Image: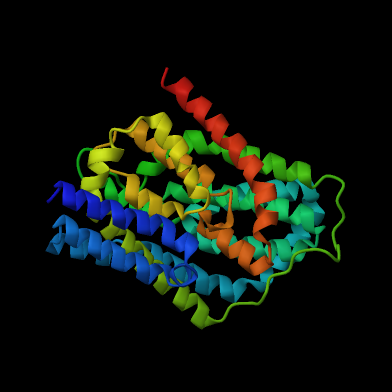
Amino acid sequence: MTSGLPVLFALGLIMALVLTLPFSVRWVEEELEGFLLTMGALAVTVSGLWSGGLAVEALEEPLKITAAVLLFGLAFRRWRGAVAGAVARLTSALGLPAFLFVLVVGLGLASSVLTAIVAALVLVEAVSALRLPRAAEISVVVLACYSIGLGAVLTPVGEPLATIAIARLAGEPHQAGFFFLADLLWPWLAPGLLLLGGLAARSGRGLETDSPSGLTQDAPEDIRSVVLRAFKVYVFVAALVLLGHGLTPLVDRYVVGMPSDLLFWVNISSAALDNATLAAAEISPRMDVERIRAVLLGLLVAGGMLIPGNIPNIIAAGKLGIKSREWAAAAVPLGLALMAAYFVALKLAAG
C-alpha cells in the first residue's frame, strides 16, 4: 500500500469529487453508480491496493443485497395491489393513529429483511391509499423514511450502508458478521423507532381520510424497472467496496484519529450526500466500536434530513411528488433534534 504525500493528495481529490459532484453536477447524479465505480477503481489504483482478493470481494459482496432487492421487488410487484386493501382494513380496525404507529415502526423493523427499497415502495402504496391531507402525508412519509433508514442498517441486506460497513469490518479486529450491526446499534435504534412511530400516531389524530390533496404515486413499476434497480444496486455496492478500500490510506491518516464528537457532527453532511458513500469513505477496521457507533448514528440520522441523504427518501419523494423544500421543512427540524438527542446519549454512555 502506498501512502506518500502525492498519493494522499490524489486520494483527497478523489474523495472531494465523490462528495461534491453528485450534488452539483446533474449527469453525475443521474449516472451515480458508474461514476462511483470509476472513482473506486481509480482510488484502488492510486493506492496500489489491487489484488485478486479485492476483485473477488467487489464481485461477491453485492450479491446478497442485490438478490434481496430483486426477489422482494418482484414479489412486491406481484402483490402490491393487496396493500391498499390491507391499509383500509387496518385503519378501520385500529384507528388512524394506531395504524400510523404500526406502519412507521413496522416498516423500520421490516426494512432490515425486505430491504430499504422495498420498504419504501410499500410506504408509497400505503400513503397513496390513505388519502390524508398533503401536509399530514408528507409528515408521515418523512417519519417512515427516517424509520426505514434506521432499521435497514441492522442487517447487511437492508441497505448499501450496512453492506459496506460489514464488508469494511469483516476482518480483524472486529470480525463483523451478519448480526454485528444489530448487536452494536439495536439498543440505540429501538427508542428512535418507537419515537418516530409515536410522532406519526400523534400526527394522525383528528384527521379524515379521502382528502383530495393526498399524495399519489406517479406510476406502477414494470419488471424492467425492478431488474434495472437491482442491477444498479449491484454496481453501487461494488463501487463502494472499491472506494472504501482505495481510500484506506487517507482514512487511516486523517479520519481514524478524529475525535468521535467531531466525526458525529461532520456526518451531518449525510443530509445532502448519500450516507452509504460516506460510510465507504469513513469506516475503518482500525476504529474502535464506540467510534464506529458514533459514525453510523450520525450518518443514519442526518441521512433523513434531505431527499438525497438515503435511498428511501429518494424513492418516496420521487414517486409521491414531494418537493425538496417540503421535505426539508418537515425533516430538518426533526433530524437536528434526533442528532442532538443521540449526541447527548453517546456522551452519557461514554461516561
- Whether residue 187 is visible to the viewer of this picture, yes or no, is yes
Quarter of the rendering containing residue 286: top left
The image's colour scheme reads rainbow
- Whether residue 184 is visible to the viewer of this picture, yes or no, is no
**Residue drawn at point x = 65 percent, y = 51 percent:** 328
**Residue drawn at point x = 18 percent, y = 62 percent:** 45
Image coords of residue 238 (percent x, y): 31, 64
Q: Nearer the viewer, residue 128 or 30?
A: 30
Quarter of the rendering containing residue 320: bottom right
Q: Nearer the viewer, residue 144 or 314?
A: 314
Query: Is residue 351 positioned above or below 343 on the image?
Result: above
Q: How many marks?
A: 0
Horizontally, is 86 left or right of 262 in the view? right
Q: Residue furthest top?
A: 351
Q: Nearer the viewer, residue 106 or 168?
A: 168
Query: Is residue 240 positioned above or below 193 on the image?
Result: below
**Residue drawn at point x = 28 percent, y = 62 percent:** 40
Q: Nearer the viewer, residue 81 or 8?
A: 8
Query: Is residue 342 positioned above or below 115 on the image?
Result: above
Horizontally, is 284 left or right of 308 in the view? left
Query: Is residue 265 positioned above or below 13 on the image?
Result: above
Image coords of residue 177 (percent x, y): 30, 47
Horizontally, is 185 left or right of 171 in the view? right
Q: Quadrant of the C terminus?
A: top left
Image coords of residue 230 (percent x, y): 43, 71
Horizontally, is 178 left or right of 218 in the view? left
Image coords of residue 68 (percent x, y): 43, 65
